[in-house]
Amino acid sequence: QGKDLEAQRIINLLLMHGESALAIIGFLGHFYRTAIQVKEVQTKAQHSTSPNLPPYVLREYNTYVRKHTVAALQKKITTCAYIDSVVKSANFDQEILLSALMVS
């Protein structure tokens, strides 16, 4: 809960300072896709190659993915795609949409 609130606060600050919601969604989508690659290597569920990341970044990803299933990470990617399409096609409050991603 605390980390979700912190993430939401950071996203709100980024939006207030003019960052594009689409850029944030793109960044988060990339993060979750990389997390899935790391998780697959970690669980050896698939014959995946480890993402080309510096060791300290890979350690942080490893810490993150231990707490999440591949299904949960895939759900985050699906949510990113959905929010991306909503932001592009409708005039919704971007803070609310991105907050929905944090709690999904």
Image: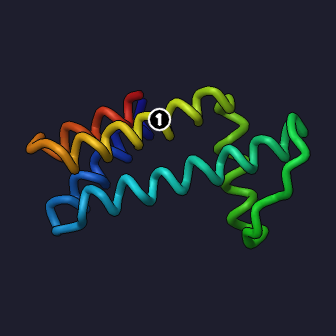
Q: Going by the image, does 52 lie left or right of 36?
A: right
- Where residue 30 appears, as percent x and y from the top left, is 53, 56
Q: Residue 92, located in which quarter of the rendered image?
A: top left
Q: What's the residue at 22%, 47% (across, down)?
A: 87
Mark 1 sits on what residue? 78
Q: Is residue 14 above or below residue 61?
A: below
Q: Going by the image, does 47 lie left or right of 54?
A: right
Given the current orientation, which residue lies at the most extreme front position? 89
Count of marks overlaid on the render: 1
- Where residue 59 appears, as percent x and y from the top left, is 74, 57
Q: What's the residue at 67%, 56% (across, down)?
A: 60
| Mark 1 Cα-neighbour bin, 10 Å: few <14, some 14–19, many ≥20 | some
The image's colour scheme reads rainbow
Q: Is residue 97 above or below residue 75?
A: below
* Secondary structure type for disc 1: helix
Given the current orientation, which residue lies at the most extreme left position? 91
Q: What's the residue at 37%, 47% (across, down)?
A: 7
Q: Nearer the viewer, residue 10 or 100?
A: 100
- Where residue 19 appears, as percent x and y from the top left, is 23, 66
* Amino acid type shown at disc 1: Thr
Image quarter of the C terminus: top left
Q: Is residue 70 above or below residue 39?
A: above
Q: Residue 1, located in which quarter of the rendered image?
A: top left
Q: Going by the image, does 76 lie left or right of 61?
A: left
